Each structure stands twice: as structure tokens, then as C-alpha cells.
Image (cartoon, rainbow, N blue to C red):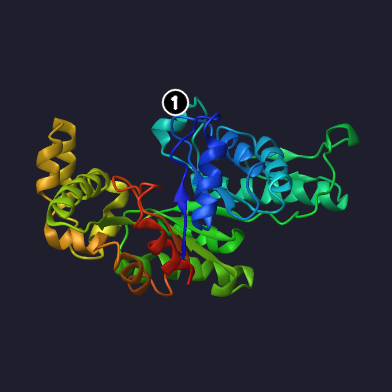
């Protein structure tokens, strides 16, 4: 399992130093997310100052951009990084699509699948001169003149990962993608019994195997060398788990362990704004199920043992984030790379 890191700064002026530092420390991939900032611009900056670390979006929201726009951005980032770019896409929920981005939200699973197939058709046109003639239910692309064609690049195979929680999206990932961004709110049992079978169905449909596919996530962790550190981090992780578990979308993650009945109680407290009360509903057993607890000396081994065969790469999820100057961090990274 590889250890990745998130883009903890989106300030384009400070990204060069940050990117160089995480590469020097030995992280395998630097992921940029679409929250308060554009997810692609930081990676363009990072591509120019690094040479080894992979660069990916985790995730970019797919529907607000035309697949043609996304195809152009991904093509340029793949070229600038000499083949180190990973295009990670997600649908986001209906409310954000319609009210934050003001775009139509319809059939997210089929539309995601079609967007990916459209981008692959566009890339094939640019790389191989294939006539662009894509017609689907949601997208049509059949005009590409030389003036708008960027032409071939040295590394045209761009890995595409998508974020998925429900089984339909996991099947889409297995069928048409190179990887799946597993939600941080997960457990080995949920992955083994809910996610993996759906992905395997998609892989079988596309004639591929597990070896052709990558599972990536960010993991809830408590990394503490003192009781005080551990208590503080455990409370913060319980709060984060409660936040996700209060949404009905993630009920299957709880149902895998028979805890689905807590969802309405968490949801009610979230509506009331009782964030402290929400965290109190997350038991120590739940914490140990959805988070990995260890010290700087043991966390790498515990993560690898828990997710062996289930995940290929991970990163430490908020609220815990490694301090890059922490003298204990290089050892953790070496254990993943060793």
C-alpha cells in the first residue's frame, strides 16, 4: 500500500515549496480536492516543480464542466507532468450541483459513465487522429477541427478514478475506470462485502481483473504517542464519523455492522445543530471499526494489515494531518515505501 498526501495549501504562491517538500519526504501521490478552490490549478503548479510524485484530483466535480473542458485540462496536466497525472472525478450531491454550480442533476451514474467514455473518445481523436463521433444520451461530441486539436502527447493513457459509495457507481468504476476513490467513511467489512463485489462485476464486464484496478482512499486515523494526544484525536474523529453517518447516503457503511438504526438519531441531532451530541452517539467500538488507531511506530503496519488486498493507496484523513516538519513522519513514510 502506498502513502499519499493531500494538498494542504491551495495558495498558488506557496504550492511550489509544498510540492517539493512532500515529494522529498517520499509520499507517492499529491491529491488536490475541489472545495474552496479549483482542483486543477494547484497541480499545474506542482507539475512544474516536481519529477517523481504522482499528481491527482480527489476529486474534481464532473458535471459542472463539459467533458471537453475536462479532457483539455487533463491532457495538458498529463503532458506537463510527464505522465504522472490521475484524473479523479466525483458527482457531488444534487443540492450542490443545482444550487452551488447551477447545473442540471440527472441520472448521476449513467451520466458519469457517459462522460468518461466521451473523454476517452476525445483523447483518442487527439492522439490517433480518430474521427470524433460520440453520441450518447447526455453528451454529443462530433466536431474537432485542427485549430482546436492539441495533438498527441508522450503519455496519452490518463488514469481515470471516480468516487463511489453506492454499488451502481462502484460497478461503473470497475467497467470504465482505472480506479475507485473509496469514501473515507469505510471499514474492511463494508469494502469486502459491499464495494468489492460491485467493482468485480464491472471489471468482469470490461474483461479486466483486480490487477488492472486501483482502490484509493483517505483513512480516519488516530496517530498519537501520548494518552492526551489520543483522547483529543479520538474525539475529533468521532465528530467526523458522526457527520458522515448522519447522512442517509452512507447508511450501508453502518448497516454492514448492524448500526443502521443510529442514522435517524444522528440526522436529527445534525438538524438541531447538536454536534457534541452527535459525537457522543459514536461508540469506541465504532471508532475502532472505522478508524485506525496507533502510534507513529505502529500506524503504518496497522493500516497495511487492516486493508491488505482491499486498498492500494491511502492518505491520513482530517482532522489528523501530518506536520511535514514532524521528525516522526519520515519513518512512517519509509515503512509504506519499504
Q: Secondary structure at mark 1?
A: helix
Total numbered labels? 1
Vertical placement of 34 versus 237: above or below?
A: above
> Dot 1 surroundings within 10 Å: few (below 14), some, or many (20 or more)?
few
Q: Within the image, what quadrant is residue 98 found in?
A: top left
Residue sitting nearer the eye, 319 or 281: 319
Residue 331 picture location, percent across and down: 39, 63
Question: Percent x, y for residue 287?
Answer: 19, 58
Q: Image height check: is 18 above or below 314? A: above
* Residue that extends furthest to the front in the rendered view of this protein: 327
Dividing the picture into quarters, in which one does residue 68 lie? top right
Which residue is painted at 75% across and 50% down in the image?
A: 121
75 on left or right of 63: right
Which residue matches tag 1? 100
Viewer-nearest residue: 182 or 207 = 182
The answer to whether 233 appears left or right of 58 in the picture is left
Name the one closer to the observer, 310 or 99.
310
Q: As displayed, is residue 29 above or below residue 10?
A: below
| Residue shown at the point (64%, 44%) measured from the top left | 47
Q: Residue at x 41, y 39 (%)?
A: 93
Q: Is residue 325 visible?
A: yes
Residue 188: x percent and y percent?
32, 68
Q: Residue at x 65, y 52 (%)?
A: 51
User: In the rendering, at what x and y percent does residue 279 appear?
Assistant: 14, 45
Q: Is 279 in front, or is 113?
A: 279
Q: Is residue 39 visible?
A: no
Amino acid at each position: 500500500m502506498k502513502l499519499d498526501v493531500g494538498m494542504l495549501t491551495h495558495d498558488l504562491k506557496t504550492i511550489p515549496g509544498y510540492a517539493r517538500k512532500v515529494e522529498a519526504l517520499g509520499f507517492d501521490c499529491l491529491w488536490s480536492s475541489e472545495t474552496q478552490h479549483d482542483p486543477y490549478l494547484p497541480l499545474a503548479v506542482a507539475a512544474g516543480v516536481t519529477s517523481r510524485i504522482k499528481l491527482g484530483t480527489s476529486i474534481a466535480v464532473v458535471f459542472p464542466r463539459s467533458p471537453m473542458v475536462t479532457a483539455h485540462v487533463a491532457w495538458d496536466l498529463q503532458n506537463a507532468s510527464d505522465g504522472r497525472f490521475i484524473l479523479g472525478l466525483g458527482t457531488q450531491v444534487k443540492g450542490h450541483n443545482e444550487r452551488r454550480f447551477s447545473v442540471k442533476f440527472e441520472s448521476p451514474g449513467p451520466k458519469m459513465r457517459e462522460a468518461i467514455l466521451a473523454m476517452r473518445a476525445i483523447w483518442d481523436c487527439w492522439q490517433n487522429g480518430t474521427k470524433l463521433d460520440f453520441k450518447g444520451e447526455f453528451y454529443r461530441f462530433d466536431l474537432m477541427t485542427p485549430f482546436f486539436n492539441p495533438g498527441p502527447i508522450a503519455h496519452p493513457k490518463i488514469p481515470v478514478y471516480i468516487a463511489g459509495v453506492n454499488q451502481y457507481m462502484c460497478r461503473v468504476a470497475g467497467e470504465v475506470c482505472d480506479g475507485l476513490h473509496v469514501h473515507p467513511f469505510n471499514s474492511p467489512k463494508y469494502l469486502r462485502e459491499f464495494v468489492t463485489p460491485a467493482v468485480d462485476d464491472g471489471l468482469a464486464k470490461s474483461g479486466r481483473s483486480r490487477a488492472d484496478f486501483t482502490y484509493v482512499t483517505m483513512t480516519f486515523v488516530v496517530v498519537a504517542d501520548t494518552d492526551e494526544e489520543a483522547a483529543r484525536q479520538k474525539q475529533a474523529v468521532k465528530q467526523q464519523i458522526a457527520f458522515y453517518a448522519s447522512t442517509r447516503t452512507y447508511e450501508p457503511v453502518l448497516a454492514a455492522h448492524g448500526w443502521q438504526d443510529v442514522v435517524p438519531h444522528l440526522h436529527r441531532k445534525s438538524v438541531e445543530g447538536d454536534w457534541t451530541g452527535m459525537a457522543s452517539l459514536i461508540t469506541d467500538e465504532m471508532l475502532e471499526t472505522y478508524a485506525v488507531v496507533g502510534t507513529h511506530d505502529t500506524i503504518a503496519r496497522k493500516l497495511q494489515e487492516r486493508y491488505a488486498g482491499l486498498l492500494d493507496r491511502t492518505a491520513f484523513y482530517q482532522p489528523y494531518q501530518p506536520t511535514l516538519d514532524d521528525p516522526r513522519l519520515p519513518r512512517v513514510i519509509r515503512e509504506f515505501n519499504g
